[in-house]
Amino acid sequence: MSISRRQFIKGGIVAAGAAALGGLGLVRNMFAQGSRNGGNGRGDDAPWEGLRYIDLERSGELARREEALWDLFSPCGLCPRECGVNRAAGVQGICSSGDAFRVASFGPHHGEEIPLRGRRGSGTIFFSNCNLLCVFCINWQIAHRGDGRYTSHAELANIMLELQRIGCHNINLVTPTHLVPHLVKALRIAIAGGLHLPLLFNTSGYESIEVIKLLDGIVDIYLPDFKYQDSAIAARFSQGAPDYVLHTSTALKEMHRQVGTLRTIDGIAQRGMIIRHLVLPENLAGTDVFVRWVASELGPDTHVNIMSQYTPMFRAHEYPPLHRRITQAEFAQAMRWAHDVGLRNFH
């Protein structure tokens, strides 16, 4: 049974507290060595080179990357907003995060894209707060209000290992942008405990190119949004981010360079990128421009999820036409645009 993200988070906030995160024992599993071959049923039978983050840890490179990310933590330059605040001293930037981090929920999520959820679910960890802060945010309780539980690096590593133990197909880090150094630190602890699942970076797309380059070889699967194609619309609806289009397009190109098109083994994603695009009323998201950009800049084989589920939430009622759902005609037009530009892997 598939559930919505909102339902998952609502139930998971309770579960996260009840699970006594620190009590989860480190699960030590032997990790797979070497590469495996597999196709995705679409003619891509190139070998999968395995989990590079394990090799990076063994070589000492992952420790160097972590250090470089902490250098961007204070003064904070982890995202394009470049608040410059001293987060190490607890000062909060636009994302309302200081030196610590919170987890809102975690567990096997069966509502993600099919190659991500498979049969056993995507091992999803929702983090509190956000660097983009959209006025129509469906998860505003955790993104804007910051609901969640303060969590240590060891506890987060335990969560990753527990999700692996129960059979999840990947570790899905949701809204990770403002917490990247913390996540890499926890990842290193989890590697020592035997983590061997693909790491998924699930983001709004509003990323610093410097940070994304530091994630090369750490992240196996990128799952970015591309929300807008107009700077004025981005500035109005996402906490004054007129540079969203510029930074997101640059970041997505780098993500694609790192991991390429989606590759699967037995239908389960191992490496690659899926772009999410939410259709908004009156084409405020610029879907026609978006699909042309994907086709020309990344190629027609790029995997794209064109989403129809826009629901007016949070402050959307203050920003017509965001106060209403999209119509069937609006979504049908979005799908025609994707077809007409030649995209082959969209749904």
Image (spheres, helix red, strand yellow):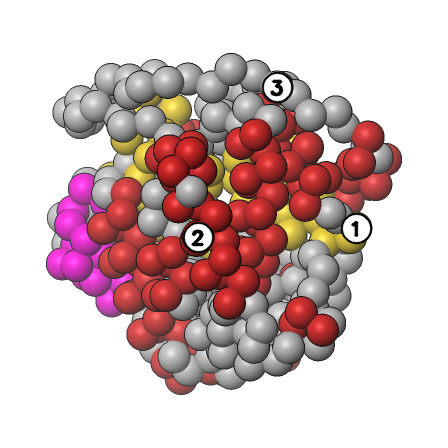
- Amino acid type at circle 1 is Arg
- Indicate the secondary structure of the residue bearing disc 2: helix
The nearer-to-camera label among 1 and 2 is 2
Which numbered tag is attached to residue 97? Answer: none
The residue under the point 27% across, 47% down is 258
Looking at the image, is mark 1 or mark 2 earlier in the sequence? 2
Residue 26 drawn above or below residue 261: above
Count neighbours of disc 3 (C-alpha within 10 A) and say few if under 14, some if 14 to 19, many if 20 or more: some
Instruction: Provide the residue designation for mark 2.
Output: 64
Report the front residue among 146 and 335. 146
Mark 1, other Cα within 10 Å: few <14 / some 14–19 / many ≥20? some
**Element on which disc 3 rests:** loop
Can you tell which of label 3 and label 1 is closer to the viewer? 3
C-alpha separation, residue under disc 3 versus residue under disc 2: 24 Å
> Which residue sits at x=33%, y=62%?
251
- Residue position marked by numbered label 3 in the rendering: 28
| Mark 2 Cα-neighbour bin, 10 Å: few <14, some 14–19, many ≥20 | some
Residue at left offset 70%, top offset 57%: 101
- Residue in front for this viewpoint, 127 or 308: 127
